[in-house]
Amino acid sequence: MHELAVCQALVAQSIDIAQQHAALGVAVIRLHIGPLSGVEPALLQSAFPLAAAGTLAAAAQLVITPQPVRVRCKTCGADSEATPNRLLCGVCGDYHTQLVSGDEMLLVNLELIT
C-alpha cells in the first residue's frame, strides 16, 4: 500500500503551502486522479486520516475527482476518451494514439483556514 507514502507527501506539500500563506490549517484538499496514475483513490481516502493526524491538515476534507483517460489520435487528429486498457481513438478507432490525460494525480487546490 504505497498510498500511505503518497498521502504523507500530499500532506507535507499541503502544509508547506499553508505555512507559506500563514494559514491556521487546511480545510479542503482537492485532487484529480486518473485511472492510469497507479494510485487507488479508495486507499488514498483511507490512508489520509493517518497521514494527516497531528498536522495542520488533520481536519481537512480530501476531495478526489476521477479523471477520464483521453487520447489524441495520430491518424485523424481527434481527441477522445478511451478506456484504460484500450487506448483506441474514439472517432476512427485507430490504435496510433498518444495519451493526453488519465495518468495524473494532480493537487488542484486547497482551502486554507486563516
Image (spheres, grey):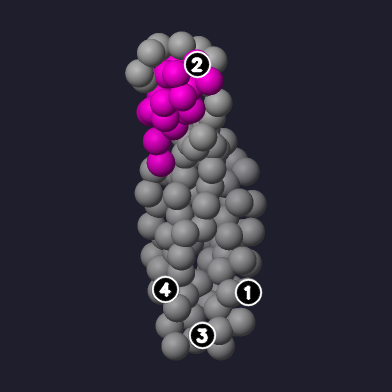
Looking at the rendered structure, the kind of residue marked 4 is: Glu
**Mark 1–mark 4 contact, CB under 8 Å?**
no
Within the image, what quadrant is residue 67 found in? Answer: top left
**Mark 1–mark 2 contact, CB under 8 Å?**
no
Within the image, what quadrant is residue 11 found in? Answer: bottom right
Residue 68 visible in the shown view = yes
The image position of residue 65, as x and y in percent, is: 37, 49
Looking at the rendered structure, the kind of residue marked 1 is: Asp
Which residue sits furthest front?
Answer: 76
> Distance of mark 3 from mark 1, alpha carbons?
10 Å
Q: Which residue is mark 3?
A: 23
Q: Which residue is mark 2?
A: 75
Q: Main secondary structure of the magenta part?
A: loop
| Residue drawn at (47%, 59%) of the image | 108
Please, what secondary structure does the residue beneath circle 1 have? helix
- Judge by depth and name the residue closer to the eye, 83 or 88: 88
Looking at the rendered structure, the kind of residue marked 3 is: Ala
| Residue drawn at (61%, 66%) of the image | 13
> Distance of mark 1 from mark 4, alpha carbons?
13 Å
Q: Residues within 10 Å of mark 2 (few under 14, many from 20)?
A: few
Mark positioned earlier in the residue sequence (3 or 1): 1
The image position of residue 70, as x and y in percent, is: 44, 31
Quarter of the image where the C terminus is located: bottom left
Which region of the structure is painted magenta? 67-89
Q: Which residue is mark 1?
A: 16
Quarter of the image where the N terminus is located: top right
Please, what secondary structure does the residue beneath circle 2 have? loop
Mark positioned earlier in the residue sequence (1 or 4): 1
Mark positioned earlier in the residue sequence (3 or 2): 3
Q: Residue 111, which numbered label?
A: 4
The image position of residue 113, as x and y in percent, is: 43, 83
Q: Residues within 10 Å of mark 1 (few under 14, many from 20)?
A: few
